[in-house]
Amino acid sequence: MDLTLNHFLFVSGALFAIGLAGVLVRRNLLVIFMCLELMLAAANLTLVAFSRFNLVDGQPAYDAHVLLFFIITVAAAEVAVGLAIIVALFRTKETTDVTKVNTMKY
Amino acid sequence: MPVYYLEFLVVALGLVLLMADAFAKLEDKRSLARLGVLGLAVIFCLLFIVKAPEAAEGGIWRFYAAPDKLSLFFKGLALLSTILVLIMAIDYAPIVVAQTANPEEGAHPQAGLGEFFALPLFACAGLMWMSSANHLVSIFVSLETVSITFYILVAYLRRNVGSLEAGVKYLILGALSTGFLVYGFAWLFGITGSMELGAITEALGKDSVNPTAALFAFALILIALAFKLGAAPFHLWIPDVYQGAPTPVTAFLSVGSKAAATMVTLRLVSPFLASAPLVGKITAVLVVVAVLTLLVGNLAALPQRNFKRLLAYSSIGHSGFLLMALAAAPRESVENALSSSTVIAFYLGAYLLMTLLAFLVLSSLRSAISGEEIDSYRGLAKRSPLHAAALLVAMASLAGIPLTAGFFGKFFAFKMAIDAGQWWLLAAALVAAAAGFYYYLKIAVSMYFSDPAKGDETAIRLSPLTGIAMVVLMILIVVAGIAPGVIVGLFS
């Protein structure tokens, strides 16, 4: 059986859905953060798949690879800042449970 | 001077501030902010002498749109809002120092204040770059530069639970919207085979485009943009984040971040609106989002008692008017028709003036008035006439009373909806504007017609820089309200 574009799109779609479900359902900030990374990974997989299967002059479209590297870099920066904020929150509230972070209400 | 030097200069200025913070032995770190204001004012003047890059310039500059007047206008908005945010930050510095104090022996009494003045400059560079971005990569990178800077700024008061809570909420939802955005970009690339907006517009206009996949990509991108814009039903983070963040950062979020999100929305949605096979469905979706945003933002503002929370809902409501101008984009060229970009640029210009004026009053009163409740502003006119007058002008303009800039912003948006025959949109906007009159003017009434609370009758001091900024903004609001052509002339 040959692998086609659809296989890659299904896998990446499933990854994105798992990540989104995790963000919505889980309560631990660190797990939520991992799920967010999963969503970005799904986008990266989609980009590479489209680039590999939509050939331009017999070559993959390298624009997608450029965006992919930027996504990886930006995700790393986001994690660096995000973990710092989570650590600061843990120091003041001693919890990483999102349901306990609710002092502001309507 | 080529136009892309401006961003380099802003980043360089930010680095200079960081270095000065680290190595120059400053007694009072607020002088860093004054240096930043001065530098940004110089760069703002340079805006008027830049020239377009040569068309032949390739390489990295293909990520950078040829500067039209509109993108220069947005760069000006970014610079102006950063200047005013830094002025607010000077007034707000004592609170930042108190909430980030370093208990170590021998530490500088204002340790941790320098970055609070340097970070807005990096956000400003991101905003300026975003206004010229014409490639999915440059849109993504500039948007994230701004977002990540804002995560830090929102959570800056690290001894304050409210600020940290706001930071965490903003971080999670911002990262979630980034996930949607890049997944949407991946699909958009898959459908069109290109990352340049020009080529994307061309590819989407063909009849061979797969409508289901294109609508899927549009939905993903719209969800991400709705988060950034604060459009319903993705607006839930806005009130909490605005309330918890330090006041100058709230002002920057509500103006800078909104201007950038609107600019990106305008650029990313235009290819879909230009595509004949898709335009009908896209417009219907935009109308629904705009109606929801108008109603939710303005009706939920009615019972608010916290001033910053009220301004948060007001910012959602104004997003509704901006989306209304986008949803009512004229389909075929009609004579004298207003284009979405004109109306949106004018609305954002007016919104910047009036929102920054309101926040300037708020942050300069922060040390004199203890709470952020609307009740604590009772009788303000007796304690500080200038503060009260500035807040009155800001509220009148936000409500859209004639002779203020806000009136023409709303007027143009209404006119577009009438021209496009979008009656549902018009009805929702009328309800929204009527609700706006009530909750904005309620504040003005309590400032002027009630007495200050007991023991609170002392006069309030005002720093000269803030006073000048307030008077300038008041004058600009009234001038733009009498002659809107002054602002329109800047970008068309």
Image (cartoon, rainbow, N blue to C red):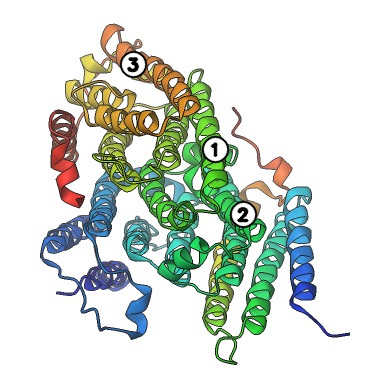
Number of other residues with Cα within 10 Å of mark 3, as a class: few under 14, some 14 to 19, many 20 or more: some
Tell me the number on the disc at residue B289: 1
Number of other residues with Cα within 10 Å of mark 1, as a class: few under 14, some 14 to 19, many 20 or more: many
Residue at image mark 2? B215
Residue B157 in view: no
Question: What residue do we see at 46% from left, 21% from top?
Answer: B427
Residue at image mark 3? B441
x and y percentages locating residue B360 in the rendered image: 28, 37
Q: Quadrant of residue B134?
A: bottom left
Q: Quadrant of residue A76?
A: bottom right
Residue B420 in view: yes
Callout 1 secondary element: helix
Callout 3 secondary element: helix
Considering depth in this image, is B282 or A46 the residue closer to the camera?
Answer: B282
Question: What residue do we see at 19% from left, 74% from top?
Answer: B2
x and y percentages locating residue A17 in the rendered image: 76, 58
Chain at tag 1: B
Q: Is residue B475 above or below residue B8?
A: above
Circles 2 and 1 in contact, beta carbons < 8 Å: no
Question: What residue do we see at 78% from left, 79% from top?
Answer: A4
Q: Quadrant of the N terminus of chain B?
A: bottom left
Q: Residue furthest bottom?
A: A58
* Dot 2 amino acid type: Leu
Q: Is tag 3's residue or tag 1's residue first in the polypeptide sequence?
A: 1
Q: Quadrant of residue B344?
A: top left
Q: Is tag 2's residue or tag 3's residue first in the polypeptide sequence?
A: 2
Left/right of residue A9 with respect to residue A71 in the rendered view: right
Circle nearer the viewer, 2 or 3: 2
Q: Is residue B324 above or below residue B217?
A: above
Q: Is tag 2's residue or tag 1's residue first in the polypeptide sequence?
A: 2
